[in-house]
Image (spheres, grey):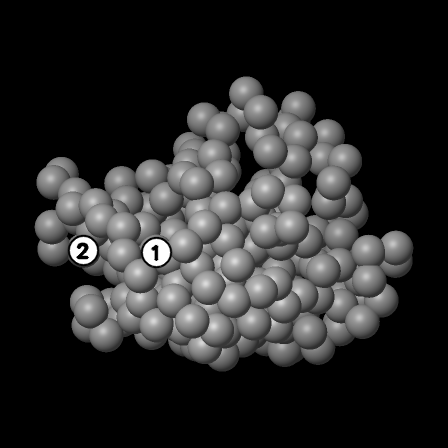
Amino acid sequence: MPVATARALIDGAAGKIEIASSIPDAPLAVAVIAHPHPLFGGTMDNKVVTTLARAFVEAGAATFRFNFRGVGASEGAHDEARGETEDMLKVVEHAQSSLGALPLRLAGFSFGGAVAVRASGRVDFVQLVLVAPGFRRITEHGMGEAPDPNDPHLGAAGRHTTTNTVIVHGDLDETVPLADSIAWAAARDVAVVVVPGGEHFFHRKLHVLREIVARWVR
């Protein structure tokens, strides 16, 4: 399947946003993927993010990765997920204006998963893939306390269901507690796929992650 790849800068609320696109001939959907925490080295070239991108492209989606404000060539400064949500929505807007009214798939890893949850509350989407989502980054309680699954920052009731959302999480993750994903998912009847032996960055388990996501989005 021929795929056109490109890097570009688009306009965002805090300045330019750096994007990387992979667009197959006659795409069936649009996918936008958010990367892990920018203050801890997260970029759109993170291996988990590029693994997700490959799975989406192979499923026929025009796929967009992007750098949050202050990362790479993206302008602006870190904004504790608030501005980063606006960045993701700008990339969605760009993708949809470029490609038309295709079904929207959203995804995010770690901090990017939390941002994707916020963004999914403001756009219509058909699928949301969350990989070890860092919910604690967007709650009122911070990193030291397990998030309340019913916190409105984590999605309105009925917005995320087993039909449109899935979480993938490693059982050896020492960065984002698996229990946080299970608690959030249980309150919404969302499936959690646990990868045995998977740590936060899915070292030696990226092929497993790719296969799980590919089966879900095909």
| The quadrant where residue 215 appears | top left
Q: Residue at x 43, y 41 (%)?
A: 45
Say few, some or many: other residues with alpha carbon within 10 Å of mark 1 (under 14 / 14 to 19 / 20 or more). Answer: some
Image coordinates of residue 113 in percent, x first then y, are: 58, 55
- The vertical placement of 4 against 161, above or below, is above
Outermost residue toward the right in this view: 144
Say few, some or many: other residues with alpha carbon within 10 Å of mark 2 (under 14 / 14 to 19 / 20 or more). Answer: some
Residues 104 and 158: in front is 104
Image coordinates of residue 214 in percent, x first then y, are: 38, 40
Q: Earlier in the sequence, mark 2 or mark 1?
A: 1
Image coordinates of residue 161 in percent, x first then y, are: 55, 65
Q: Amino acid at mark 2?
A: Pro
- Is 94 displayed left or right of 17 in the figure? left
How far apart are labels 2 and 1 at the CA level? 18 Å
Residues 81 and 54: in front is 81
Q: Secondary structure at mark 1?
A: strand
Residue annotated with mark 2: 27
Residues 46 and 31: in front is 46
Residue 65 visible? The answer is yes
Which label was assigned to residue 19? 1
The quadrant of the picture occupied by the N terminus is top left
Q: Residue at x 20, y 69 (%)?
A: 98
User: Label 1 near label 2: C-beta < 8 Å?
Assistant: no
- The vertical placement of 110 against 17, above or below, is above
Q: Secondary structure at mark 2?
A: loop
- Is 26 displayed left or right of 56 in the figure? left
Q: Residue at x 74, y 40 (%)?
A: 175
Residue 107 visible? The answer is no
Image coordinates of residue 125 in percent, x first then y, are: 41, 69
